[in-house]
Image (spheres, rainbow, N blue to C red):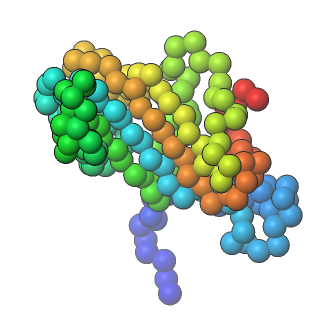
């Protein structure tokens, strides 16, 4: 079969993984089977909107910002229980989340590592102990303004977000080695 004249675009980190990181992981952990080498599975970005109880327009603004950051339409997260003290009713939208896979995942990770994290105020590195024991890494950002897609003048409120990087690694050690190869700035 002949390749098409137009080369298909591939994210930078996906190429880096295929060409360099996979070989480094095989060498470090002694994998004999190519399929045993850990890889990124998905990235889940979650944004809680506590002010949504008082003003439903804030949900729309937050979802618009999350869509701009991730390049994908967010799914609303709804309250499971009614809590009278918080004026929260069952089924009320209180957040938004996006699950990124494949090329969008690599593009988001690239922007997170090279652009967003260096723009965080007083950034000293990521906590290297935020793994869950099964090879997944969780982190939080206090401001969504660190992403270049967000125009500072157009936002009405600053929201934080949780980012979970899900890998196929079986242990924290393998996952940390994989994310270190992706240039995650761990402090310990």
Left or right of 41 on screen, residue 175: right
Q: Vertically, is 156 above or below 187? A: above
The image quadrant of residue 19 is bottom right
The residue lying at 42 percent from left, 42 percent from top is 45
Residue 170 percent location from the top left of the image: 70, 59
Q: Given the current orientation, which residue lies at the most extreme top position?
A: 122
The residue lying at 65 percent from left, 24 percent from top is 125
117 and 128: which is toward the camera: 128
Residue 149 percent location from the top left of the image: 34, 31
129 and 63: which is toward the camera: 129
Q: Vertically, is 149 above or below 14? A: above
The reply to whether residue 11 is visible in this rendering is no
Residue 165 percent location from the top left of the image: 55, 47
Q: Vertically, is 159 above or below 167? A: above
Q: Vertically, is 84 above or below 74? A: above
Q: Given the current orientation, which residue lies at the most extreme bottom position?
A: 1
Total label count? 0
The residue lying at 54 percent from left, 58 percent from top is 41
17 and 180: which is toward the camera: 180
The reply to whether residue 31 is visible in this rendering is yes
Q: Which quarter of the rendering shows the C terminus? A: top right
The residue lying at 56 percent from left, 23 percent from top is 118
Residue 172 percent location from the top left of the image: 72, 48
Left or right of 151 on screen, residue 5: right
């Amino acid at each position: 079969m002949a390749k098409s004249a137009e080369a298909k675009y591939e994210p930078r980190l996906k190429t880096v993984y295929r060409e360099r990181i996979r070989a480094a992981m095989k060498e470090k952990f002694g994998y004999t089977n190519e399929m045993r080498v850990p890889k990124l599975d998905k990235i889940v970005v979650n944004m809680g909107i506590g002010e949504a109880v008082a003003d439903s327009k804030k949900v729309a603004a937050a979802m618009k910002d999350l869509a701009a950051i991730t390049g994908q339409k967010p799914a609303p997260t709804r309250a499971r229980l009614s809590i009278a003290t918080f004026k929260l009713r069952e089924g009320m939208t209180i957040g938004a989340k996006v699950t990124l896979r494949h090329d969008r995942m690599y593009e988001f990770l690239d922007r997170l590592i090279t652009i967003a994290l260096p723009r965080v105020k007083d950034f000293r590195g990521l906590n290297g102990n935020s793994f869950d024991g099964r090879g997944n890494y969780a982190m939080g950002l206090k401001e969504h303004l660190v992403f270049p897609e967000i125009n500072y003048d157009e936002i009405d409120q600053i929201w934080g977000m949780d980012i979970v990087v899900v890998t196929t690694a079986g242990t924290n050690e393998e996952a940390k080695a994989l994310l270190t190869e992706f240039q995650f700035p761990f402090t310990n």
